[in-house]
Image (cartoon, rainbow, N blue to C red):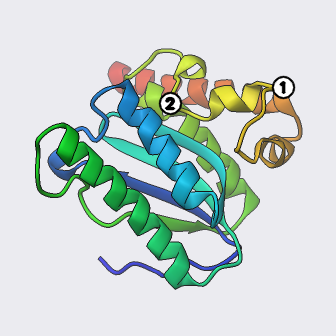
Amino acid sequence: MKYEPLQANKFYHIYNRGNNGENIFIEDRNYTFFLSLIQKYILPIAEIHAYCLLKNHFHLLIKTLNFENKILSKSFSNLFNAYAKAINKAYDRNGSLFQDRFSRIQIKNDEYLKQLILYIHLNPSHHGFTTNFENYKYSSFIAMMSTAKTLLKRDDVLELFDDISNFRFMHYKRQQEIFEKKSELYLE
């Protein structure tokens, strides 16, 4: 697969999964460590707008800062290499942790951006990790609803949805739409 180079000052959906569908997060401390590596390697070169970490894959919504592709790509490479090395060492494994290089999709309009935020936050429910996406602790949804200090671009995200109540409403509306679609499939 050919990967488009990352460009400065653009929104991207960044995602990857475990090699052969394996888990990339084995226990709670792995999630925390991955988030600390995001802070170390990604925050200097990008804003974080949303994220969700699941056992075998993750999603990030970022906006790159004003850096060349080489620097942006190197920062992501450092993140994934540092994490893979740590997991391989901690769990006495070797080989590739991730399925491939990280995937990236450039987000070119606000509507797609909004839909992606909903998709990222609802991912734990969609994959059956929880019945209540609001309480999934490895998602940025909790930080979005909080007033506590965060490294996320919370104000920008909430402004995209007009306000916090509409942000929450749109999540529940989308979850209901997904539930109704699944119900229709079972009834057919």
User: Which x, y percent locates residue 92?
Assistant: 11, 41
Residue located at (65% from left, 56% from top) = 112
Quadrant in the picture for residue 187: top left
Q: Amino acid at mark 2?
A: Tyr
Residue located at (32% from left, 67% from top) = 101
Secondary structure found at label 2:
loop
Q: Return the residue nearer the eye: 127 or 142.
A: 142
User: Which x, y percent locates residue 52?
Assistant: 50, 39
Q: Is residue 146 left or right of residue 87?
A: right
Q: Return the residue nearer the eye: 107 or 144.
A: 144
Asked if residue 143 shows in the view, the reply is yes
Q: Residues within 10 Å of mark 1 (few under 14, many from 20)?
A: few
Q: Residues within 10 Å of mark 2 (few under 14, many from 20)?
A: some
Query: Would you place residue 133 above or below residue 110 in this image?
Result: above
Q: Quadrant of the N terminus?
A: bottom left
Residue 165 is tagged as 1
Quadrant in the picture for residue 43: bottom right
Tag 2 or tag 1, which sits nearer the N-term? Answer: 2
